[in-house]
């Protein structure tokens, strides 16, 4: 459906109205909410019961969070000239904001659950991957999500 609408446009559907758009938007919101709820329950259960996760890993998660912020900005900075040539005319401030607000969520958590359920690999590494992925999703939502308003005001791009 997404490919069809991308190719034909919204007018390619004869009964396309705002109501249809709102219904699909709401269904997408419900699906994403269910995914986060189920993943939160599963990941919370698995991580809290794991004997492989100790208090030593928590400072590592803060370091990993900072490293991921820098890497994400670096990658966007490297590809910035290409994006500008493709028509994405970001200013440097907008590029920084794009890097800062890039949340990690449902897809990463789903992949971590798939890795955790795989028969290959040690239980320690699978527990750490699940813990690291859920920690990054948590930290970006809590830190980046709650401070984005202040970053926008500081950069004066509102």
Image (cartoon, helix red, strand yellow):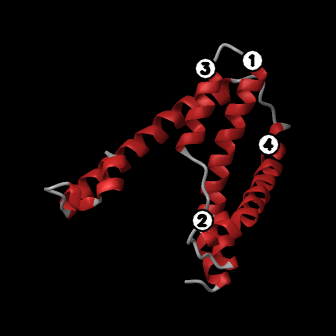
Numbered circle sitting on residue 58: 4
Q: Is residue 124 left or right of residue 114?
A: right
- How far apart marks 3 and 4 lie (CA) works out to 23 Å
Labels 3, 2: front one = 3
* Residue 58 position by quadrant: top right
User: Viewed as shown, does residue 78 lie left or right of 34?
Assistant: right
Q: Position of residue 143 (x, y in %)?
A: 66, 60
User: Dot 3 corresponds to which residue?
Assistant: 117
Do the residues bearing badges 3 and 2 touch, measured as CB atoms within 8 Å?
Answer: no
User: How many angstroms separate mark 3 from mark 2 (CA)?
Assistant: 32 Å
Q: In which quarter of the image is the C terminus?
A: bottom right
Secondary structure found at label 2:
helix
Residue 75, x across and y down, in percent: 74, 58
Check whether the beta carbons of the residues at disc 1 and disc 4 lie within 8 A of each other. Answer: no
Disc 2 to disc 4, C-alpha distance: 21 Å
In space, the residues marked 3 and 1 are separated at their CA atoms by 10 Å
Q: Viewer-nearest of labels 1 and 4? A: 1
Residue with the mark numbered 1: 121
Query: Which mark sits nearer the N-terminus, 3 or 2?
Result: 3
User: Going 70% across and 35% down the picture, which residue do you hit?
Assistant: 131
User: Does the residue at mark 3 contact the one at mark 1 (Cβ under 8 Å)?
Assistant: no
Q: Residues within 10 Å of mark 2 (few under 14, many from 20)?
A: few
Residue 146: image tag: 2
């Amino acid at each position: 459906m997404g490919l069809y609408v991308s190719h034909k446009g919204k007018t390619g559907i004869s009964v396309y109205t705002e109501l249809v758009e709102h219904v699909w938007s709401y269904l997408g919101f419900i699906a994403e909410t269910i995914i986060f709820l189920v993943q939160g329950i599963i990941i919370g259960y698995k991580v809290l019961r794991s004997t492989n996760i100790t208090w030593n890993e928590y400072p590592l998660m803060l370091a990993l969070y900072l490293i991921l912020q820098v890497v994400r900005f670096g990658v966007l900075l490297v590809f910035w000239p290409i994006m500008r040539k493709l028509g994405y005319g970001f200013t440097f401030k907008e590029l920084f904001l794009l890097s800062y607000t890039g949340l990690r969520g449902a897809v990463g958590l789903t992949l971590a659950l798939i890795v955790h359920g795989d028969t290959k690999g040690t239980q320690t590494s699978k527990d750490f991957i699940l813990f690291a992925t859920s920690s990054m999703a948590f930290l970006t939502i809590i830190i980046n999500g709650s401070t984005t308003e202040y970053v926008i005001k500081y950069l004066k791009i509102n």
